[in-house]
Image (tube, helix red, strand yellow):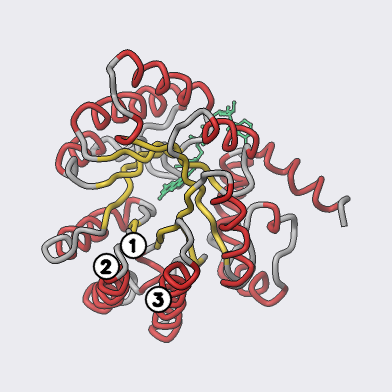
Amino acid sequence: MLKDLFIGLSQNQLLNKAAQKYGLKLGAQTVVAGTNIEETIKSIRELNAHGIACTIDNLGEFVYKKEEATEAKEKIIEVIEAIHDNHVDAHISLKPTQLGLDIDYDFCFNNLEEIVERANRYDIFINIDMEDHNHLQPSFDILDDLSKRYDNVGTVIQAYFFNSEENIKKYKDFRLRIVKGAYKEPAEVAYQTKKDIDANFIKLIEWHLLNGKFASIATHDHHIINHVKRFVKESNIPNDKFEFQMLYGFRKDLQLQLASEGYNFCTYVPFGKDWYGYFMRRLAERPQNLNLVVKQAFNK
Ligand code: FAD
């Protein structure tokens, strides 16, 4: 019920516009690193000091105007230059709908290519985040086209999709982030229960650890993390074949603990004015995240 409410709110364009106007509110500052690049680089330096790498997301999605997509592309290129200039350990995560996928495939592809080309000059990796099932195939198409010319791109496999096993096998030679999946998807295309999603998540992680290039295991679920720790030990999988990823502001103690135990760790660092949809999805995933919001409200 609450999940549906927050997913619905995350897609409300009017509320999204209002949120952009008023800056980080409602407790979003706990899970969003800042509204500009300078603040974000500062947060990244702090994480890097603890041996934690970062993937930076210039917040924004479901863009329907070319000017907005072009603006997003330029901002991401600025972030790439900032990573290079500041020598921080970070790469980029981006969403195709922010770069115009709902406007025109070629327009979006060209935006992405410009970004990937710039990042390639500095050997910076670009992760194509995966969105809802309507955008799944076109996002894989973009990856297929880009990877003909560039090797600094990878993507995400969402375990709730029935076709995730097929896709993880097809893209095994890419650096892949494996997640449970964040959107509300219909029963025709995706598993619906936590039990089924978790079982498939573990199956995909194990397969990719044994057969794939590099796995970013992105979850806050300690049951899954403990399972992976046991599995890599039993299967003699070296630490340089995988990393754990979590979102900025979530389970900070566990993030630091995993890094100090010698695992590669990468924090997903969102920043920017367009925080509303991202923030609502985090509330949808785990209504207890409202606790963070309440604490923030009393912590002024
Ligand atoms: P959940 O299933 O939400 O939680 C399982 C259990 O873990 C909970 O019952 C609880 O015991 C524990 N737990 C979880 N969170 C906490 C907490 N904050 N504090 C204490 N205990 C907790 N989704 C996409 O669809 N596309 C993407 O591109 C994408 N990229 C992502 C990148 C990163 C780095 C991460 C971390 C997630 C990403 N996601 C993405 C979201 C992902 O699909 C899930 O929706 C999200 O991570 C919630 O699932 P979970 O695996 O963290 O655990």
Q: Which mark is residue 120?
A: 2
Which residue type carries mark 2? Asn
- Tell which of 24 and 54 is nearer to you: 54
Image quadrant in which you'd find residue 92 = bottom left
Q: Earlier in the sequence, mark 3 or mark 2?
A: 3
Residue 48 location (% of width, % of height): 54, 51
Residue 22 seen by the camera: yes
Assign a secondary structure to mark 2: helix
Using a 10 Å C-alpha cutoff, classify the residue at mark 1 as few (fewer than 14 neighbours), some (14 to 19) or many (20 or more): many
- Tell which of 73 and 152 is nearer to you: 152
Q: Report which residue position mark 3 lands on.
A: 77
The image shows residue 295, relative to residue 67, as above or below, that is: above
Residue 2 location (% of width, % of height): 64, 41
Image quadrant in which you'd find residue 1 = top right
Residue at the outermost bottom position: 67
Task: Choose mark 3 or mark 1, whichever is in front.
Answer: 1
Q: Report which residue position mark 1 lands on.
A: 124
Assign a secondary structure to mark 1: loop
Q: Earlier in the sequence, mark 3 or mark 1?
A: 3
Residue 299 location (% of width, % of height): 86, 52
